[in-house]
Image (tube, rainbow, N blue to C red):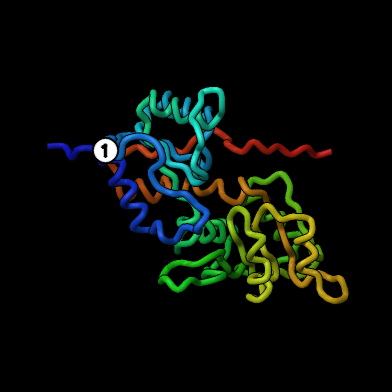
């Protein structure tokens, strides 16, 4: 007798055994967001963000579930209206009977999670948490070593190739050596001081404000480490593949499909 497809809540339970909901930041909203926890899942679409195109893609491939990194319901909605983007997507999920699950800062905070996988993709070894938490196997950011020292210019070339990033914003000496690298997928300005304390030659993250670039300058105005804003989408898009691979090992009977949709609304104009 063939094994029945798992329930959405069983997939959720497996993810939460890895990335416990208690690891999420207090402002976050992770877990099952829309739909039926008892939905049988034969096919699931995995995306960084939920967008109308992602929902249309899920409908086209016959997905029973969508898993995203960024939550749709980040804050409690005051109303659900088809005239607004969030309401329209919630109503469309309900109409299609697609269950939505989001795994956000709890996945950022575990061994093998978003920042660890970003570090691996940048060619780092000896990867550890940048800021370990008290709970075993959890922390913030990641730090590791390149196999050999590179100039910052060469490291930026390697980084943009690895992340398929058309451009980055950075401060640093192009010829300075880079060996120890700290990373944080997504918005990680709050970890700049920790990266400096860890002795990183470069810190890769996203959403760095103009004034934060001054935080890495020494008394003489020279950078104490390179600070690199590689883009929010670019430093987290690998989460789609990470989740597909992790889930496929545990639920081989389910088709976990990485979205073909580029979910970022941000485009880069290069003069």
The N terminus lies in quadrant: top left
Left-right relation of 40 to 111: left
Q: Going 43% across and 41% down the picture, which residue do you hit?
A: 67
Q: Nearer the viewer, residue 151 or 53?
A: 53
Q: Going 56% across and 46% down the picture, which residue do you hit?
A: 237
Whether 7 is drawn above or below 24: the answer is: above
Q: Nearer the viewer, residue 23 or 234?
A: 23
The location of residue 28, given as percent across then percent down, is 50, 52
The C terminus lies in quadrant: top right
Q: Nearer the viewer, residue 229 or 155?
A: 229
Left-right relation of 10 to 116: left
Whether 15 is drawn above or below 260: the answer is: below
Left-right relation of 71 to 16: right
The location of residue 180, given as percent across then percent down, is 64, 71
The location of residue 36, given as percent across then percent down, is 31, 35
- Residue 19 seen by the camera: no
Q: Secondary structure at mark 1?
A: loop
Q: Nearer the viewer, residue 103 or 126?
A: 103
Q: Going 46% across and 38% down the picture, which residue do you hit?
A: 258
Residue tagged 1: 38
């Amino acid at each position: 007798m063939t094994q029945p497809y798992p329930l959405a809540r069983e997939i959720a339970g497996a993810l939460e055994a890895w990335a416990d909901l208690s690891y999420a930041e207090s402002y976050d909203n992770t877990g099952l967001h829309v739909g039926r926890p008892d939905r049988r899942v034969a096919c699931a679409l995995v995306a960084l963000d939920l967008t109308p195109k992602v929902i249309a893609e899920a409908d086209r491939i016959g997905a029973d579930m969508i898993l995203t990194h960024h939550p749709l319901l980040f804050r409690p909605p005051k109303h659900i209206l088809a005239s607004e983007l969030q309401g329209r997507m919630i109503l469309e999920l309900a109409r299609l009977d697609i269950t939505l699950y989001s795994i956000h800062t709890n996945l950022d905070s575990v061994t093998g999670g978003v920042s660890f996988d970003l570090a691996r993709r940048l060619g780092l070894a000896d990867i550890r948490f940048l800021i370990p938490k008290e709970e075993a196997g959890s922390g913030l950011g990641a730090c590791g070593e390149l196999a050999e020292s590179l100039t910052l210019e060469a490291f930026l070339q390697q980084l943009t190739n690895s992340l398929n990033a058309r451009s980055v914003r950075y401060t640093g000496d192009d010829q300075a050596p880079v060996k120890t690298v700290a990373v944080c997928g997504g918005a990680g300005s709050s970890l700049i001081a920790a990266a400096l304390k860890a002795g990183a030659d470069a810190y890769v993250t996203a959403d760095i404000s103009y004034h934060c670039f001054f935080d890495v300058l020494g008394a003489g105005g020279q950078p104490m480490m390179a600070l690199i804003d590689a883009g929010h989408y670019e430093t987290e898009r690998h989460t789609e593949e990470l989740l597909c691979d992790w889930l496929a090992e545990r639920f081989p009977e389910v088709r976990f499909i990485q979205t073909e949709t580029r979910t970022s609304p941000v485009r880069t104009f290069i003069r």
